Image (cartoon, rainbow, N blue to C red):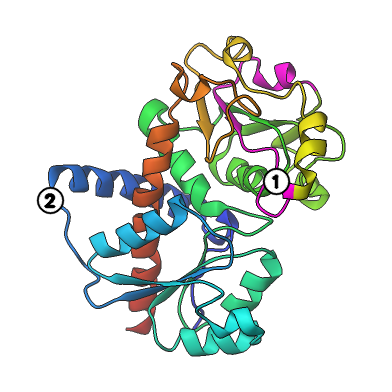
Amino acid sequence: MAIRHFLTLQDLSRDELKAILQRATELKVQRQKGTDDHPFSGKVMAMIFEKSSTRTRVSFEAGMAQLGGSALFLSPNDTQLGRGEPVEDSAKVISRMVDIIMIRTFGHDRIITFAENSSVPVINALTDDFHPCQLLADMQTYLEHRGSIAGKRVAWIGDGNNMCQSYINAADRLDFELVIACPEGYEPDAALLEKFSDRVSIVRNPLLAITGADLVVTDTWASMGQEEEKKSRERAFQGFQVNEDIMQKAAPDALFMHCLPAYRGLEISETMLESKWSVVWDEAENRLHAQKALIEFLLNERTNKSK
């Protein structure tokens, strides 16, 4: 019996993704009204962090508690993974003791190997290649503020990193146009670009991407693990800052998102997060609700298949 995992957005069908986004907003409203229930009493999530995070830990730990379950925080110092135990062995052991596993790590091949050896659902909470949980939150946020993103124009400004690559998957799953503005040498994976060339294009001038865009998104220029490249990246990305002046070229009702942490004065202006376009704080909160909907989906899928 195949276990459902969530390693990229491509692991969900279009209908499943739309249902999860809708459910995320339902769970959000229930939480606000105090009418939420706790369907997963006794269920345990293992949270494996090989990369640190604020939003990821808080949202998953709080989300699991709100669903009635509990979560275990496991850093490299807490597990044999940090001491060289094979990923396959750790996956087989940990998955026998918990109901669902979340992993935030470096190489995407590492989480693939873990999932292949896990007897419970595995969620990608970030790898060097993809960050699909953040896309759930972003797409939920757009849906809440503007309705369906189908047919819209999305501008990605900056590095072709894991967030950008997850936006490519989202463009396919949710039927929007993605225009990526990045310097030469900082493009996303060539195979992804080729696979989804009907929806994704590359430009070198941010103004070309932002003009008429319904959603503008950026991220830090130097991701975790790239600290030594920080200065060279700052030089390469000069002219790629998202600020109030450039946002004037976007569609009249455009939104701005950033997955955080943000570096004011670099990839964004000092006041961009507080601008009229920004929905960044809603986007950050929606990590909680979108991930709860995802956990619910994966645990229910496992329960239904076991009957």
Residue 228 % position (x, y): 77, 49
Front-lying residue, 282 or 208: 282
- Residue 123 falls left or right of residue 144: right
Residue that appears at 80% across and 52% down: 191
Circle nearer the N terminus (2, 1): 2
Q: Is residue 263 above or below residue 95?
A: above
- Residue 142 falls left or right of residue 37: right
| Label 2 with label 1: CB-CB less than 8 Å | no
Label at residue 161: 1
Quadrant of the snapshot with the C terminus: bottom left
Residue 83 % position (x, y): 63, 83
Q: Secondary structure at mark 2?
A: loop
Front-lying residue, 185 or 225: 225
Residue that appears at 57% across and 38% down: 175
Front-lying residue, 243 or 25: 243
- Residue 300 falls left or right of residue 259: left
Q: Quadrant of residue 188?
A: top right
Residue 180 % position (x, y): 72, 32
Magenta run includes residue 75: no
Q: Secondary structure at mark 1?
A: loop
Q: Is residue 199 above or below residue 111?
A: above
Q: Quadrant of residue 70?
A: bottom left
Residue that appears at 26% across and 64% down: 65
Label at residue 35: 2
- Amino acid type of disc 1? Asn
Judge the density around disc 1: few (<14), some (14-19), many (≥20) Cα neighbours within 10 Å. many
- Residue 225 falls left or right of residue 152: right
Q: CA distance from mark 2 to mark 1?
A: 39 Å
Judge the density around disc 2: few (<14), some (14-19), many (≥20) Cα neighbours within 10 Å. few
Q: Give, as a single range, the part of the protein colored magenta.
A: 205-227
Residue 226 % position (x, y): 73, 50
